[in-house]
Amino acid sequence: MEAKKTSSLGHLPLLFLLTLASFSASTSAGGIAIYWGQDGREGTLAAACATRNYAYVNIAFLSAYGNDKTSTLNLVGHCNPSAGKSTSVSTSIRACQRRGIKVMLSLGGGGSGYSLHH
């Protein structure tokens, strides 16, 4: 009696499904990114990170920089960085980072007060 030969391709769909399932399970929070900082009604940065809904937070916006301009962080409705009143934001950034959330600074915004050239 001859042994039945099986093709390794027969296991391919199962391998694909197992890989897909492990990928789906490893993306808790869905890798979702948000912009935070342009609406005082959106709540604090710490509260946004505490939901654990987000993997990335873009703080919006560093609206003026480069070409000898004074750097300006625009966090409408949250704080006034130019008056030194953003300590709650810096504390919130650290809280987000402790949760494993990547916090980035978004450059530019809708205005034209920025340049990467000097």
Image (spheres, rainbow, N blue to C red):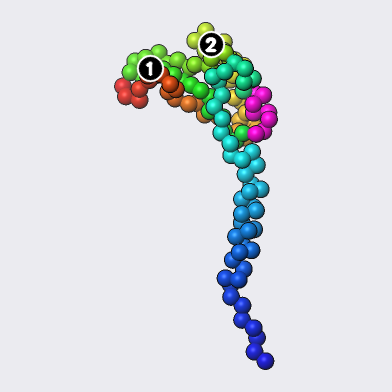
Q: Is residue 5 above or below residue 11?
A: below
The question of residue 35 being in magenta is answered with: no
Indicate the secondary structure of the residue bearing disc 1.
Answer: loop
Q: Can you give x and y, in whole percent of width and height, for residue 117 in the image?
A: 32, 24
Residue 80 is labelled as: 2
Which badge, 1 or 2, is on the more N-terminal residue?
Answer: 2
The count of marks equals 2
Q: Can you give x and y, in whole percent of width and height, for residue 13 in the image?
A: 61, 64
Q: Can you give x and y, in whole percent of width and height, for residue 35 in the image?
A: 54, 27
Question: Where is the N terminus found, in terms of image quarters?
Answer: bottom right
* Residue 73 left/right relative to 56: left
Q: Which residue appears farthest toward the left when viewing the image?
A: 118
Q: What residue type is labelled 2?
A: Asn
The question of residue 52 being in magenta is answered with: yes
Name the residue rendered at 59%, 24% in the picture: 93
Q: Which amino acid does label 1 sit on?
A: Gly
Residue placed under numbered mark 1 in the picture:
113
Q: Can you give x and y, in whole percent of width and height, for residue 109 in the image?
A: 44, 22
Dot 1 surroundings within 10 Å: few (below 14), some, or many (20 or more)? some
Magenta residues (range): 46-53
